[in-house]
Amino acid sequence: MDLGPYLAFDGVNYICTICERTFSSETALYAHCRSTSRHSWCERCSRVFISLQARNSHLQGSKKHYICPKCPHVQDFKAFQELQDHLVESHYFCPDCKLYYSSFDKLQEHDIARHHLCITCGDYFANKNNLQMHQQKHQPRTMECYGCYRCFKTISGVLIHLESGSCVSEVTEEELDDIARECYQSGKYIYTGFEGGEWLYRCPSCDYTFAKLSALYQHAEDVLLCSSLLSGDGCLAKLARFIARSLQ
Ligand SMILES: [Zn+2]
Ligand SMILES: [Zn+2]
Ligand SMILES: [Zn+2]
Ligand SMILES: [Zn+2]
Ligand SMILES: [Zn+2]
Ligand SMILES: [Zn+2]
Ligand SMILES: [Zn+2]
């Protein structure tokens, strides 16, 4: 057992060499160390220091102690991560940029601008586009089904619902495929290669192919480069209006 430089055990008694006092047990020795004003004590390391200054320099230098550099009173953490969490929460610190902010709002502004933080769910994204794509998830469900009154967040959500056959309009995936082929825009998104006898949907802007219409829409919703197909004069916007008319 290592008692450090100022405490000793002679085989029978525990000794505080600073005060030259003996104790019958380790517990009694430590109780003395905690209560005395003649020397200083580090509870976590069970170690005596000759003075408060000696103890404080131990706190600063030891791997067992993580001291907050900002708090006016010594705030000691057991692990680096705990200190870092404290710095973020209490001192508005950005660990990536090693910068302190004056308020929570200022730190959050920085997190949004620099680190593409979604404040709705607290996730971070690699770039602004990814954040914008992600934030569509948080949008309210506003797409009403073409065949019933259920609402979905996206067109692909409506199409998955229709393809699954769970809509009260009793539309089937085959009927939906027929409607898609009938639409005058079909030349743009129907793949005519007929691989293995299966016909497929194709994204006209990137040439990816899909077995289901909902997958094509999901792709256009997720991939920024292909998302224009869904708005205004885009063929998928026109097809969506055509499906709506066909099912009403
Ligand atoms: Zn002592
Ligand atoms: Zn210590
Ligand atoms: Zn602090
Ligand atoms: Zn930062
Ligand atoms: Zn989010
Ligand atoms: Zn429906
Ligand atoms: Zn595409």
Image (spheres, rainbow, N blue to C red):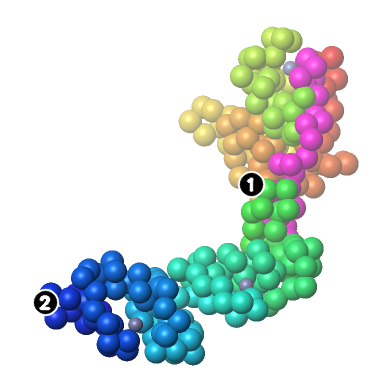
The residue located at (78%, 15%) in the rendering is: 148
| Percent coordinates x, y for residue 213 in the rendering | 66, 30
Q: Is residue 64 visible?
A: no
| Percent coordinates x, y for residue 124 in the rendering | 64, 58
Between residues 135 and 66, which one lies in front from this camera angle?
66
Disc 1 element: loop
Between residues 77 and 228, which one lies in front from this camera angle?
77
From the viewer's perspective, tell me whether residue 228 is left or right of residue 31.
right
Residue sitting farthest toward the right: 232
Quadrant containing ligand 1 reads: bottom left
Q: Is residue 208 visible?
A: yes
Q: Amino acid at mark 2?
A: Gly
Which quadrant, please, contains the N terminus?
bottom left
Q: Which sits earlier in the primary sequence, circle 1 or circle 2? A: 2
Crowding near pointer 2: few (<14 within 10 Å), some, many (20+)?
few
Residue placed under numbered mark 1 in the picture:
207
Q: Amino acid at mark 1?
A: Asp
Asked if 23 appears above or below 125 in the picture, the reply is below
Please give the range of residues in magenta: 128-150
The residue located at (72%, 26%) in the rendering is: 158
Disc 2 element: loop
The residue located at (67%, 22%) in the rendering is: 161
Q: Is residue 19 magenta?
A: no
From the viewer's perspective, tell me whether residue 140 is left or right of residue 40.
right
> Is there CB contact under 8 Å for labels 1 and 2?
no
